[in-house]
């Protein structure tokens, strides 16, 4: 089954790697394989105790994000209901609320339809390693694209953010079409090795956001998706699949929530002055070494 040591390791791994642009799902496949935890590797290919365990970790991660952004979520939720009642969008919070709604729909629909198929097909060490390398290339491509003259012009032409020295348009200036593109990009994170935060940040950078706002939008967008996925699968946790591992789920969830909270604090500061390059190089190196190991 699942030991408490494994619960702590995987819990912290989930909390950190869900928000770092390095693919939590990919690492939940690769790290157990590297450590020789074959019971966890095999458990990911079908309905199992491990999937029930991951449900608890995802819920804890989402709750940590909700707590960190609690003041912003109050404004967003209030803005949603206010604009819905008025049938008109006036404030940045109202617009951000609807941008998040639009961006959430594609991943939500595709997750319901294909999450099980993609998980069983790609939750294997070699596959995760290959897609982790692809994730690194996506991050590199986003940084190169962000430096293109047309993207810089787009960033400068729109109303500017004041929270960063980097030129960048304000988050609430995104169009609904652009938010939809970011949401579609998130679909690829259903594949182990492709990072949800990484690919949504890449899409945001491509539309002229600075790194800090691209990360903030990514984290806000991830919150309802992760929470909904956990709640949707809560039956796995409370049902027969969770039998015998509920203590480990509690311990792992605490670790995951703590890791997620520390991660978001660190990353929002990191992206005020730094880029995706270190994470891109890590994904390429870790993916390549894992390909050699598991080929």
Image: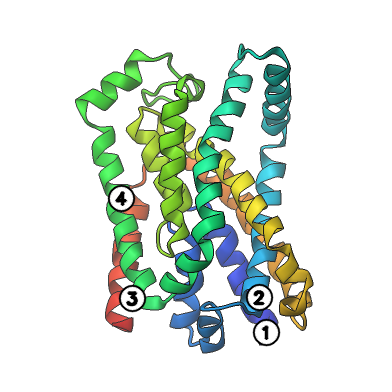
Discs 4/3, front = 4
Q: Which of the two discs, 4 and 2, labels the residue nearer the N terminus?
A: 2
For label 3, the residue is 290
Structural crowding at the residue carrying mark 4, measured as other residues with C-alpha within 10 Å and reported as few (<14), some (14–19) or many (≥20)? some
Instruction: Work out which residue is located at the far left of the displayed protein and give it.
Output: 149
**Label 3 SS:** helix
Q: Which of the two discs, 3 and 2, labels the residue nearer the N terminus?
A: 2
Estimate the spatial distance between the alpha carbons at disc 4 and disc 3, rounded to whole Å: 18 Å
Percent x, y of residue 252: 69, 69
For label 1, the residue is 3
As drawn, 150 above or below 202: above
Estimate the spatial distance between the alpha carbons at disc 1 and disc 2, rounded to whole Å: 6 Å
Q: Is residue 190 left or right of residue 151?
A: right
Q: Residue at x 51, y 45 (%)?
A: 267
**Label 1 SS:** loop
Query: Circles 1 and 2: CB distance less than 8 Å?
Result: yes
Query: Circles 4 and 1: CB distance less than 8 Å?
Result: no
Discs 4/1, front = 4
Query: Circles 3 and 2: CB distance less than 8 Å?
Result: no
Estimate the spatial distance between the alpha carbons at disc 4 and disc 2, rounded to whole Å: 31 Å
Looking at the picture, tell me which residue is in the foreground, 188 or 144. Answer: 188
Q: Which label belongs to residue 219?
A: none
For label 4, the residue is 138
Count up the numbered dots: 4
Structural crowding at the residue carrying mark 3, measured as other residues with C-alpha within 10 Å and reported as few (<14), some (14–19) or many (≥20)? many
Query: What colouring does the structure picture have?
Result: rainbow
Q: Residue at x 42, y 76 (%)?
A: 124
Estimate the spatial distance between the alpha carbons at disc 1 and disc 3, rounded to whole Å: 24 Å
């Amino acid at each position: 089954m699942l030991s408490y040591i494994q619960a702590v390791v995987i819990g912290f791994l989930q909390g950190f790697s869900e928000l770092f642009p390095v693919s939590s799902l990919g690492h939940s496949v690769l790290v157990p394989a590297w450590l020789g935890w074959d019971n966890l590797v095999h458990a990911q290919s079908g309905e199992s105790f491990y999937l029930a365990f991951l449900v608890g970790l995802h819920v804890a991660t989402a709750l940590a994000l909700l707590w960190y952004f609690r003041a912003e979520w109050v404004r967003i939720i209030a803005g949603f209901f206010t604009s819905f009642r008025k049938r008109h969008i006036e404030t940045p919070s109202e617009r951000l609320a609807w941008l998040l709604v639009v961006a959430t729909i594609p991943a939500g629909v595709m997750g319901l339809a294909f999450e099980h198929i993609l998980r069983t097909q790609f939750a294997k060490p070699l596959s995760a390693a290959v897609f982790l390398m692809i994730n690194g290339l996506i991050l590199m491509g986003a940084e190169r694209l962000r430096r293109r003259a047309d993207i810089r012009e787009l960033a400068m032409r729109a109303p500017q953010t004041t929270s960063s020295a980097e030129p960048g348009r304000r988050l609430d200036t995104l169009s609904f079409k652009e938010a939809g593109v970011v949401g579609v990009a998130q679909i690829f994170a259903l594949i182990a090795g492709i990072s949800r935060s990484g690919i949504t940040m890449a899409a945001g950078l491509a539309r002229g956001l600075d790194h800090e706002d691209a990360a903030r939008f990514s984290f806000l967008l991830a919150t309802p998706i992760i929470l909904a996925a956990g709640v949707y699968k809560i039956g796995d946790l409370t049902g027969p699949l969770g039998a015998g591992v509920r203590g480990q789920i509690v311990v792992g969830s605490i670790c995951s929530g703590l890791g997620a909270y520390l991660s978001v604090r660190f990353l929002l500061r990191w992206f005020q002055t730094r880029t995706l390059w270190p994470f891109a190089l890590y994904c390429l190196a870790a993916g390549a070494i894992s390909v050699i190991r598991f080929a």
